[in-house]
Amino acid sequence: MSADRGYPEDPPFLGSGVEWVDSVMAGLNLEQRISQMIMVAAYSRQGDVNVKQLERLVSKEGIGGLIFFQGNPVKQANLSNRLQSLADVPLLIAMDAENGLGMRLDSCVTYPPQMILGALGGDAAIYRMGRDMARQMKRLGVHMNLAPVADVNNNPLNPVIHTRSFGSDPSGVSKKVVALVRGMQDQHILVAAKHFPGHGDTETDSHHALPRIDHAPVHLDSVELRPFREAIKAGITGIMSGHLEVPAMEADPGRASSMSASIIRGVLRDKLEFRGLVVTDALNMRSLSALPADGSRALEAVKAGNDILLMPSNVPAAVTAIKRALKRGEIREATINASCRRILEAKYWAGAHH
């Protein structure tokens, strides 16, 4: 459907590589399909112990993806190639590079923060920036950028978003989010706009505690949700669920939005009609301290409707918790299959199968 008519445009990876996806799905048992949903952190600067851990997670646990952080581009490419050679199913390689590879890697390009770009009169330069960032990622074997920040920075006391946002005007933020997304996706780089349903109006850093958003539904709809809605209309491939308490959307006190079926399934999937990848924010963050890091966070994230489980503290425990929930009937096998298929289609579209 056309975004110009106001309807959501399907993410471009949907339906990609049907024969390849069907073949891979047929060769995976249920546990392996669960493992495809796991994405762990990788660092090209760390030593042999870290590399051995990653090799085990890829070859023994069958994880689906890696997110690279600080390091060197040549070392990262070499490590990425090494780990890809050990994977039965090609790994989805991601980075959190909001303003370019230089945010994470030495000797790489760093672009201005989003707030500076938000002051530009037009969006053409932002599109070109997204295109160039994507081309640089392709050269490194990266398939996904966990960006852009789609939060509206409407609280000057916000300790974590501030200059990472395009600004305080929902309309302007929306247009620039869409421009950056299109620039990256036109080069077949997957993205994940964050932090749904909106981390802009908080005074708490979700890395350390659970922020609370107390706005009424009408305000959330017109401000916080607007950039995400416009990105969905434009066919965005992924959205990151934030760790936020939003009472107007989730009645259970203290339940993070990333763990909320009311928010992920009810708002993001049903109301906004998003059909792409839903990626959790990191599951090892302190904002989720109400849940033990023994697999419970990963389980609740799957129940809520997330596809990719980012950085669980204990991968075997996460997989085991999800398997047990399946046996108890708390999760349907069809849910796992749908997430696994979306991930595989995204991998094919981004070129991971080559």
Image (cartoon, rainbow, N blue to C red):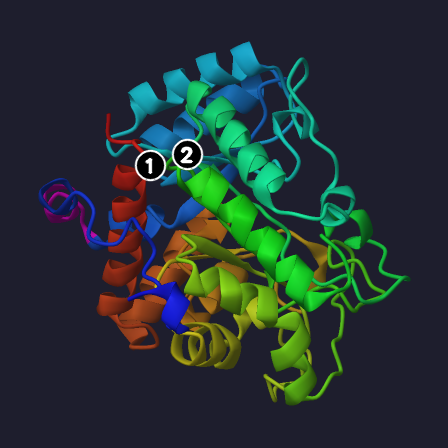
* Residue 326 colored in magenta in the image: no
Q: Which residue is mark 1?
A: 350
The residue stretch that appears in magenta: 22-29
Quadrant of the image for the N terminus?
Answer: bottom left
Vertical arrangement, residue 349 with respect to residue 59, above or below: below
Q: Residue 47 location, x and y as percent?
A: 60, 15
**Label 2 close to label 1 by CB (< 8 Å):** yes
Q: Amino acid type of disc 2?
A: His
Rendered residue at 43%/59% (across/down)? 234
For this rendering, which residue is in front, 354 or 184?
184
Q: Tell me if residue 26 is in the magenta stretch.
A: yes
**Is 72 displayed left or right of 268 in the figure?**
right
Viewer-closest of 46 and 90: 90
Residue under label 2: 143
Q: Is residue 203 visible?
A: yes
Q: Residue at x 54, y 62 (%)?
A: 297
Residue 9 vertical placement versus 115 (above, below):
below
Does dot 1 land on a helix, a strand or a loop? loop
Identified at 54% across, 30% down, the residue is 133
